Each structure stands twice: as C-alpha cells, then as structure tokens.
Image (cartoon, helix red, strand yellow):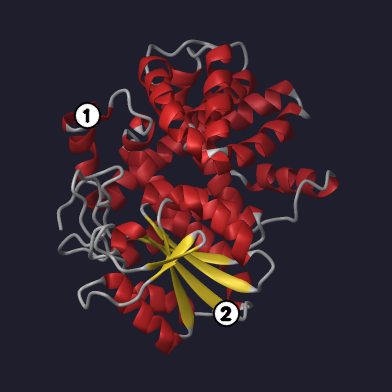
Amino acid sequence: MKTITYNLKEKGTDYYEDIRKFSSEVSDYFSKNFDSSYSEFVNYIITNKIEPVRTFEEYVYDFLSAGVYLNIYSSYSNHSSNSLLQLQKSLYQLRRKNKSLKLYIDPLRGIISTAFLYNKKENKKITTPLKEFSKLILWLEAAGEFREETKRFEIIYNFLKNGEQNYAGNFISSIKKSGSWFETESIKQLGNYTRGVNDFIKELHKKYRWKENYIFTGRERIEYHLSLVGAELMNNGFKRNFHETKTKALLVPACMRFKRDDECKATANNFDMQCTGCSHECRVNHLTKLGKEKNFSVHIIPHSSDFTTWLKTWAVGTNVGVIGVACPLNLITGGLELKSLDIPAQCVMLDYCGCSNHWDEKGFPTELNEAELLKILEDKN
C-alpha cells in the first residue's frame, strides 16, 4: 500500500476520533454564526414545500460546501463562457444517458476541461454575489463531478433570489467566510491524513491533461477535508432512518478486490457483482463472510457510474439500509444521491485510494476500517 493523495491509517493518529471532534466543531461554528439564516432557510423550505426538512447537519454541509466551492472555483467559473459551459453540461448529460457514447464524448470533455474550464485566471468581478453563485453552479454542472451538490445549491440560490439583494450578498459573504475558516482549521486537524494531495497535484496531475477526469483528479486538499467532514455530518443526519430498515446492504468499489478484473471470479448480477470467494486474501471475500455473520449483503459496484442504475433498479422501495464505501471525492455525491432517492444510508470512507481508473496505473487493493463498519451497524444511538 502506498499513499497517493490521502491515508486514514497514518501512524500515530486516530482518524475517527479526529473527524468526530472536528465535525462537532464545524456544527458548533454554524450554530453560532448561522442561527437566524438557518431558521429563515428552513422556513423557506417549509413554506414553499421544497422538500421534507432535512437535519441540521445536512444543511450545514450544504452551506459549508457552497462557501468552499465559491472560494475555490469562482476564479474559474467567472471567466468561463456560458455557451461553453452549456455545451460541456450537455455532453456530460448525454454521456450519462448513453454509455456507448463515452468513447467519443470523454476525449472532447477532456479537451474542454483542460483548455477552458480549468484555466485559472485573476478573479473577474461579477456584478452581484448572486450572479457569481449562479455562474458557479453552471460551472460545477459542466464539470460533471458535482451533480448532486449543484441540486442542493440551486435550492440555496432560489432562496436567496426571492429575498433582498443585500441579504443575498451578506449570506454569500458569510458562507465564503465559513469556507475560509474551514480551510484554516481543517489543515490543522485533518492535514495529517491528506499530505499527499499537494505533491500529487504538483508532480503527477499533469499526466491527466486532456483527459475527462482532469478536474476530478485535480481536486484541492480542502475538498478532501470537506468530504471527510461531510461524510461524518451525513452519517449523523441519516443514522435514525438507516437503523429503521429491515435489511442492510454494503456497497463496495471494485478497487477493494485482491485480484484484477480478468482474474476475479465475482459473478455479474445486472449492475453489481457478487463475490464467490476466489481469494483468501481478498478484502471483499472477508467482508462477504462477515456479512453472513452480521446479516448484511455485499455488492461490488464496478464503477461509480453504475451506482445510480443499481440504486434505481434494486434498492428503492425495498426497505434496505445502504452502507456506501468510496474514496472522499466520490462518497459525498453518492450519499446525496441516496438521500434524494429516499434510501436510508450510512457511509464508510476507504482508508486510501488505489484504483487504476484514476490514481495508479496498475492499481492496488484498497480497504476500509472494519471496526467503523461494525460500529455503524450496531450503534443505534
């Protein structure tokens, strides 16, 4: 095992103790600084019947992530052409609808992302903070890595659009301030786990130029911290509904397998795969055996793009609680999608990344913290 970008098993650390402590501090920050804004936002949700009111922790993540992304990506989005963003967004939507077009669309998206979308310039002033936020949302949609987050931001945008211009400006200023606070504090408290990110971007990210995953692999260190905290916040927010389900399903990525695709004997089952126990060294095999003891099923999801299809064809309406396993940059989008489909869920972060699709040419098996998995299954408080 080698550290590419992040590693939750750094010697002399206790990741789950650290993340719980810091996530609590994040919640406290928003309780102190967003009390009235939060109340007004929830009132807007209720009055306009936008959605069933979510937990405080879920809205904390919505506000915080909006602030973080405004700070990171406005210098890209403010300079991007609306027509180019719409084109890139349409290509992404077409690719998701028709996988057979991936071979043709991905190279084009890679060119557009590298040459235009991910081309940082001195920040260009946009007339109002609300227009800046709107442009950011379009840029994130075009990037294709934030499809669930942008749905959340649209709700915030519409809430602000219906209010006074000064209120919108102050709100956006406050969430950007929260993003700056988070960047400073997260480095102090989670930086031990993400030491590899900056070196990866500096030394290896150039290899991804002109590829469809150029933006995905170039995500900044603070975005890893945001996902780590977001996973903890969402687990807290989703816990009660998850434990009310009758059965549990563990969704693991293909990168956890010990053997390569051409050697693994897992059997395909529509949109997921089932372990057949072909290797005693395989962590998926071990989890499958554990599942038989602890009463949960294990499903291998070959690629994150298969996640949505699997959810819609198998889990919806079946009273199943899903535990998703992924690396930070994939986990939050998956968690938000589960919520949007009303599927009770929890998540466990991979201890490190290692898939051949994005991070390592040959790839190597990844793993999760089994003690944390069991805690999630058993802790109903």
Please indicate, yes or no, whether residue 230 appears anywhere in the rendered image: yes
User: Is residue 271 or residue 17 the one in the foreground?
Assistant: 271
Residue 76 found in image quarter: top left
Please determine whether, in this image, residue 352 is positioned above or below residue 209.
below
Q: Decide: few, some or many residues near mark 2? Use Cα within 10 Å; few <14, some 14-19, many ≥20.
A: some
User: Is residue 212 or residue 47 the one in the foreground?
Assistant: 212
Which residue occupies 49% across, 20% down?
77
Q: Which residue bears the numbered disc 2?
A: 247
Q: What element carries label 1?
A: helix
Residue 285 found in image quarter: bottom left
At label 2, the amino acid type is: Thr
Q: Position of residue 169 (x, y in %)?
A: 63, 24
Which residue occupies 25% across, 71% down?
282
Q: Position of residue 128 (x, y in %)?
A: 62, 16
Q: What is the quadrant of the N terminus in the image? A: bottom left
Q: In this view, does 258 lie to the left or right of 316?
A: left
Q: What element carries label 2?
A: strand
Q: Which residue lies furthest to the bottom in this view?
A: 293
Q: Is residue 370 left or right of residue 342?
A: left
User: Is residue 147 or residue 199 the one in the foreground?
Assistant: 147
Q: Residue furthest right?
A: 47
Q: Which residue bears the numbered disc 1?
A: 207
At label 1, the amino acid type is: Lys
Q: Is residue 273 left or right of residue 88?
A: left
Using the numbered discs, state the Cα–Cα distance from disc 1 to disc 2 in whole angstroms: 43 Å
